[in-house]
Amino acid sequence: MDHSEHIQQVSRSNTFILTALWGFVFGILVASFIFIPPLVCLLIIGVGFATYYAERHTIILIVLCFFALGAFGYNIKDFHELVPAGTNGVVVSEPERRDFDTRFVVKTDTGEKVLVSTDVFNDTKYGDEVSFIGKAEAPKPESYAKYLSKSDIYYVVNHAKVQVISSGGGDVIIRNLLKIKSGFVERMKGVLPEPESSLLAGLVVSGKQALSKDILDEFRRAGVVHIVVLSGYNITIIAEFLFLIFGFLGSRVAVGASIAGVLLFTLMSGGSATVVRGAIMVLLLLLGRILYRPGSAPRILLFTAVLMLIHNPKILVFDPSFQLSFLALLGIIYGAPILETWLSKIPSKYMLRSIITTTLATQAFVFPYLLYNMGNFSLVFLLANLLILPILPIVMLIGFMATLLTFATSVLAWPLAFVSHLLLKWILFVAHFLGNLSFASIQIEDFPLWLTIILYCGVGFILWKQKGLIHKLTNSN
């Protein structure tokens, strides 16, 4: 086999693999909205083989077979026979304390998971064995029920009376991770005043539940609430920033620093499922920078996403964290190289241009989704993000390091804490000032899916027009 034949064979193999992966994803997507019975899945596979034997169309065979496998996998995950919820069980999630209630998931003695809502002063912890009194109901509306079903939750109990029977149950690893997280948050509060300490906790380990309702409302009106929605978006920002910082030491050292940062972030956040999924996506993409050429990043990302969908097909449509992680990484892979060229007049000193292009690229890719998911259209979002996003990875890193240093000595932590305090204060000021302008935002109830698709088509059109530039930049190394 000569060189040209080898290249053609590799190209065909890559085409078949990508076709199979996309067919599998499309099968899950369709099955998320339309029930496809298992017999129909078998019929689709049969049609694929019949077409192949008749016309020798390998692509059609692959598409139909993997489409059917995706739909069948979703049906397996979606199949659930309800049994009575029970009133005793073990708390299997970190309690989320809100302004008016506390929520946690209980795995009852009957095996069902129940989302329990109780009073705000409840001190239940992960691993506690509890009994609760309340009416178990199916979640409403249907969209919320689908969201909970991805985590195998089919009951909710509101305004429950909860009594702790014993403590120390649950998974020992998760329990210890949550203890680390709790201690980390307490250290933050020891070196930073409020509300700066809560903001840092929200950015790094706790998500939006760390912030008060008033501050969250200001962040929503300013169009920057996504920075405190703990997800793969935050992990992506951290990993890319560390890669830029240590890039002068070589790609392997930079990737090593990024991997260490992602692992630390995951541990400090308590190892929640959403963060772990985002971390896996980012880690595999980072490893791909060492093991493969840069141009293979999209394929690594797709392969990683498919592995996660095999484990839980419902996250494709019903898990915002998975979607944010995927979109943010797409922004770095495709959007950042274009912006790097367009904004070439911005000084590259101190990585200013790289930080701006990376943060703007991720924002461009996640914004239509956030608009559709949250329905809050901020008229000042562009200015707010330009003022906040470039310093976001810096404040997360400095605040994180300052907190870590407190475990050794507070003296070393104070200089970094002072810098992080100023940066956090700036973020709060921008959100407060812009979020309280009379014209800051408008509420769009049920932002239409078709308009979201049009916005992403616009992003896709720009990428298509710049495909030559993207190919050149992503394969330049």
Image (cartoon, rainbow, N blue to C red):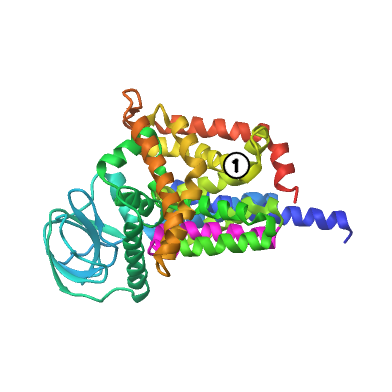
8 in relation to 264, above or below: above
- What is the number of callouts on the image? 1
266 in relation to 344, above or below: below
Q: Is residue 391 magenta?
A: no
Question: Which x, y percent locates residue 121?
Answer: 15, 58
Residue at the spot of label 1: 352
Q: Does residue 368 appear in the picture of this structure?
A: yes
Residue 65 in the figure: left or right of residue 160: right
| Of residues 473 and 432, the one drawn nearer to the viewer in this rendering | 432
* Crowd tier of the residue under label 1, counting other residues whose Cα lies within 10 Å: few below 14, some 14–19, many 20 or above: few
- Going 62% across and 50% down the picture, which residue do you hit? 298
The part of the image, by quadrant, that contains residue 239 is: bottom right
Q: Outermost residue, front direction? A: 411
Quadrant (top left/top right/bottom left/bottom right) for the N terminus: bottom right
Residue stretch in magenta: 266-292
| Of residues 455 and 60, the one drawn nearer to the viewer in this rendering | 455
Q: Amino acid at mark 1?
A: Leu
Question: Which x, y percent locates residue 252?
Answer: 67, 62
Q: Secondary structure at mark 1?
A: helix
Question: Which x, y percent locates residue 342?
Answer: 66, 32
